Image (spheres, helix red, strand yellow):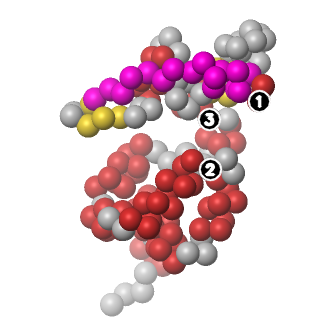
Amino acid sequence: MRAPRPCGVCGAAGAAKYRCPRCAAAYCSVPCCRTHKERCAPEPERSAGGESSPGGAEGAGQAAGGPWSVEDILSEDEEQDRVPLQKLQLLGESEELRGLLLNPHLRQLLLTIDGAEDKSSLMKKYMQEPLFVEFADCCLRIVEPPEKENILPE
């Protein structure tokens, strides 16, 4: 894992543990985050294969002065929970998941979580909603399929 970089706001050496989700600029604390937010100008949306990619990884890394890696945005503990890119791509190929995402209520729940300060407690609340549970179960079945030894023979 890379050593922390200097804070882009206050300049504290090796203190930048956090990154701006819009432009990937490094900062070290809540006050520096607030200062950065006031002047943050996200990179313009870029297209990849005709689709727009708001806040996309490529634009974010280049706004910070070069490409960034997973190590830049994940701590060691978070990296253990990371889903490999190949498995994430399976989510985009799932017809079942696409069908669920047609539901406007589910889309609104996901947008609310994305914009929330405390995502963890909101997700706990939403895990009481059958539609959200169905969505979460579908995602888990795709990225972590059940092992064949647990399936009863027909």
Where residue 112 appears, x then y in whole percent? 54, 55
Residue drawn at 67 percent across, 13 percent down: 8
Mark 2 or mark 3, which is nearer the start of the sequence? 3
Q: Secondary structure at mark 2?
A: loop
Residue drawn at 44 percent across, 67 percent down: 105
- Number of the label disc, if any, that sits on residue 30: 1
**Tag 3 and tag 1, C-beta contact below 8 Å:** no
- Number of the label disc, if any, that sits on residue 130: none
- Number of the label disc, if any, that sits on residue 116: 2
The stretch drawn in magenta includes residue 43: yes
Tell me the mark number nearer the camera, choosing from 3 and 2. 2
What amino acid type should be assigned to the residue bearing mark 3? Leu
Q: Give the residues in magenta.
A: 32-47
Tell me the mark number nearer the camera, choosing from 3 and 1. 1
Where residue 122 appears, x then y in whole percent? 65, 60
Quadrant placement of the C terminus: bottom left
What amino acid type should be assigned to the residue bearing mark 2? Ala
Image quarter of residue 9: top right
Would you say 78 lies left or right of 65 here? right
Q: CA distance from mark 3 to mark 1?
A: 18 Å
Q: CA distance from mark 3 to mark 2?
A: 19 Å
Residue drawn at 65 percent across, 68 percent down: 125
Q: Is residue 133 above or below residue 89?
A: below
Q: CA distance from mark 1 to mark 2?
A: 16 Å
- Number of the label disc, if any, that sits on residue 74: 3
Quadrant placement of the N terminus: top right
- Other-residue count near label 1 (Cα within 10 Å), few / some / many at <14 / 14–19 / ≥20: few
Q: Taking the image as drawn, is residue 67 in sight?
A: no
Q: Is residue 84 above or below residue 74?
A: below
Mark 2 or mark 1, which is nearer the start of the sequence? 1
